Image (tube, grey):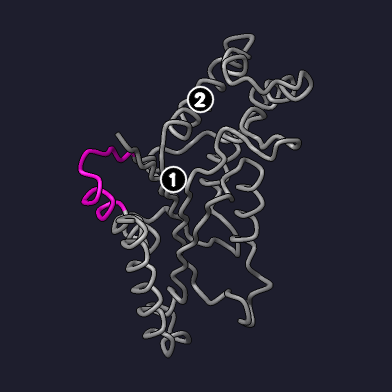
């Protein structure tokens, strides 16, 4: 049974990025009626930011060169570490079990929401990091689709392209754990044109951008 893991990051229930992920999930369900959608809503159920307990565990794993997932799962040494580590493994197990990863996230101040950063910092443990010799890891080859919403335009050739710290960060972070092997972006841009008067002339461009992202999301989901 195929599994889609949907990670929604926006603080707003009706956000543009969630609109795209919802359309994707609906199309995927239609194409895979036997499949399961696992929904991780980082706004409704926030992930705890990395704490000293997790950092201590990860440091020990790095020192020992631990790459075995089973050994890593048992790495906590006391109650405080167990509580933190169990929280991380709830997220890691969802990620390891999925066949397709869909992440929706808005651009906040040129980058990603802290909710996503908290989630990624929890799951990016040493055994999931790509082996430098083989270039492979447990997540290598997992198709990953990222649906973004951006208040302005940040694509190549645009005046604000250099201010895009969202896609470059995601590509680097996902490359570390093998998720850049099959990585697709769906960018809906100029979303602020709907409520910022100075951007009103770009409203039609924003509508077209969202339409293209939704159509591509449906195509990918059905493929």
Quadrant where the N terminus sits is: top left
Q: Is residue 217 above or below residue 94?
A: below
Quadrant where the C terminus sits is: bottom left
Check residue 199 for magenta coloring. no
Count all numbered tags in the image, as a single digit: 2
Looking at the rendered structure, the secondary structure element under dot 1 is: strand
Q: Quadrant of residue 204?
A: bottom left
Query: Could you tell whether 61 is left or right of 40 in the image?
Result: right
Q: Residue furthest right?
A: 63
Residue for point 58% across, 75% down:
155
Q: CA distance from mark 1 to mark 2?
A: 17 Å
Residue to which mark 2 is pinned: 89
Instruction: Give the magenta part as a residue range.
Output: 25-38
Check residue 29 for magenta coloring. yes
Q: Is residue 108 above or below residue 47?
A: below
Residue to which mark 1 is pinned: 101
Residue for point 58% across, 50% down:
181
Q: Quadrant of residue 218?
A: bottom left
Rendered location of residue 211, percent (x, y): 33, 74
Residue 129 vs residue 194, the one in the foreground:
129
């Amino acid at each position: 049974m195929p599994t889609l893991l949907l990670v929604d990051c926006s603080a707003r229930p009706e956000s543009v990025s969630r609109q795209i992920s919802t359309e994707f999930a609906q199309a995927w369900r239609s194409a895979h009626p036997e499949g399961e959608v696992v929904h991780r809503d980082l706004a409704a159920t926030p992930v705890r930011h990395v704490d000293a307990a997790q950092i201590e565990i990860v440091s020990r794993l790095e020192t020992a060169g631990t790459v075995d997932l089973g050994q890593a799962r048992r790495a906590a040494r006391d109650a405080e570490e167990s509580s933190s580590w169990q929280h991380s493994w709830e997220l890691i197990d969802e990620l390891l079990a999925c066949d397709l990863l869909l992440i929706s996230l808005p651009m906040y101040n040129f980058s990603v929401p802290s909710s996503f950063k908290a989630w990624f910092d929890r799951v990016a443990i040493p055994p999931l990091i790509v082996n430098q010799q083989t270039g492979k890891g447990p997540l290598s080859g997992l198709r990953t689709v990222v649906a973004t919403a951006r208040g302005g335009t940040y694509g190549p050739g645009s005046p604000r392209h250099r201010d895009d710290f969202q896609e470059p960060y995601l590509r680097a972070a996902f490359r570390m754990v093998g998720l850049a092997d099959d990585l697709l972006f769906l960018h809906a841009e100029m979303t602020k044109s709907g409520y910022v008067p100075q951007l009103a002339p770009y409203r039609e461009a924003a509508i077209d951008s969202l339409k293209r992202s939704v159509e591509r999301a449906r195509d990918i989901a059905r493929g």
